[in-house]
Amino acid sequence: CLCFVTFSQHLAANEDRFLIGPGDAIEINVYNEPDLRVKAKVGASGTIRIPLIGNVTVIGKTPKQLGSELEAAFDDGYLVNPSVSVVIAAFRPFYIRGSVNKPGSYSFEFDMTVDQAIAVAGGLKDRASKTKWTILRGPEKQKLTATPETSVFPGDIIEIKESFF
C-alpha cells in the first residue's frame, strides 16, 4: 500500500516539476559543510545570497538545476567535489478570482486540480461559467485554458468568468 508515503518522499517526487519563484522558501545544504547552509524566502528580485559565492539568481530554475549550478560554483576553487541539495520548503500560494464565493490566495498543495481549487474557494457562484476558466501561469503570465482536471501550480492565478446564460 502506498498509503504511507511521507511528505518528504512526495516532495522529492514532485518538486522538479515546479520552478522556484518569488514567495517560495528554499533550503540549500552542502554535504559536510553546515556553515554553508542557507534558508531563504525568495524575493521579487529572484536572487539570494550564498556564502562564498555571493548573490545567485534562483528564480525560474528547478531545485535540481540550482543544485547543479551551486555545485559547479563551489567546485570552482572553494570545495572539493561538493554535493549540494536544494529543497523548496514552502511554495508560494495560488490565487483564484472571478465568479467564486471566496476569491483570494490559498496554500498550494500537490496534485491539486482546478476543480479542487474552486471547492477550496467556496465553490462557483450561481452565474459562474462552467467552461470559461483560465489560468495565468509563470512570470510571463502565460494564459492557459483550464478544465476541471487541469493541475494547479504554485503562483497560478485561476480566473473564473461569469456566464450570461
Image (spheres, rainbow, N blue to C red):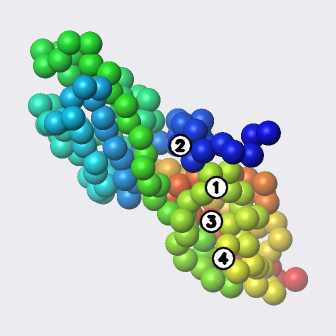
Q: Secondary structure at mark 4?
A: loop
Kind of residue at badge 3: Ile
Query: Which x, y percent locates residue 12?
Result: 54, 36
Q: Which-is-in-front pick, marks 4 and 3?
A: 4
Q: Which residue is mark 1?
A: 152
Q: CA distance from mark 4 to mark 1?
A: 13 Å
Kind of residue at badge 2: Ser
Q: CA distance from mark 1 to mark 3?
A: 9 Å
* Residue 143 visible to the viewer: no
Q: Which residue is mark 2?
A: 8
Mark nearer the N terminus (4 vs 2): 2
Q: Is residue 27 above or below residue 154?
A: above
Kind of residue at badge 4: Ala
Q: Secondary structure at mark 2?
A: helix
Q: Which residue is mark 3?
A: 158
Disc number placed over residue 21 in the picture, else none: none
Q: CA distance from mark 4 to mark 3?
A: 11 Å
Q: Is residue 80 above or below residue 57?
A: above
| Image point (28%, 48%), residue name | 39
Q: Which-is-in-front pick, marks 1 and 2?
A: 2
Q: Is residue 48 left or right of residue 133?
A: left
Disc number placed over residue 121 in the picture, else none: 4
| Image point (76%, 85%), residue name | 125
